[in-house]
Image: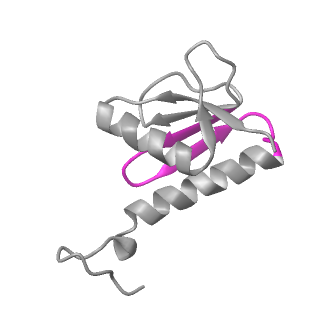
Amino acid sequence: MSVTTASLHADTPLARAGLERAAALADIEVVAPGGNPEMSLRSAGTGHPHPALDVSIDADRAVITMTTQPSAAVWSAIRALLAHLAETTHPSTMPRPDGTPRAI
């Protein structure tokens, strides 16, 4: 199975940590600057978009911009990334202030 790679761009350390965590959960390997990633993963308004595939994450949306068709493995990684982001940000999945889970 091939590993999907991404460059990561964030405007704050907390945003970077969140994107790194989401990427790790989706089995996306973050590559160092100057590498040859398959996509860019970034907080909204930061970094330079990848020319072929760019995933921009904001507080209430994800925007995917592409100029070429991603491989099936890359699509799978993007779906996993979005699923992890939705699980951690959707109000119905967040625990109540007292720590008990919410009913879905």
Q: x%, y% of residue 18?
A: 40, 43
Q: Which residues are magenta?
A: 53-71
Q: Quadrant of residue 30?
A: top right
Q: Residue at x 42, y 27 (%)?
A: 46
Residue 3 lies in what quarter of the image?
Answer: top right
Rendered view: 13 above or below 78: above
* The C terminus sits in image quarter: bottom left
Residue drawn at point x = 51 percent, y = 49 percent: 62
Q: In x, y percent, where is residue 5?
A: 66, 33
Q: Is residue 82 magenta?
A: no
Is 53 placed left or right of 25 in the picture?
right
Q: Residue 20 placed where, x, y %?
A: 47, 39
| Residue appearing at x 63%, y 46% in the figure | 27
Residue name at image x 82 percent, y 43 percent:
71
Q: Which residue is situated farthest in the top direction here?
A: 34
- Quarter the N terminus occupies: top right
* Residue 56 on the magenta segment: yes
Relative to 57, 36 lies left or right: right
Count of marks overlaid on the render: 0
Image x and y of residue 100, in percent:
26, 81
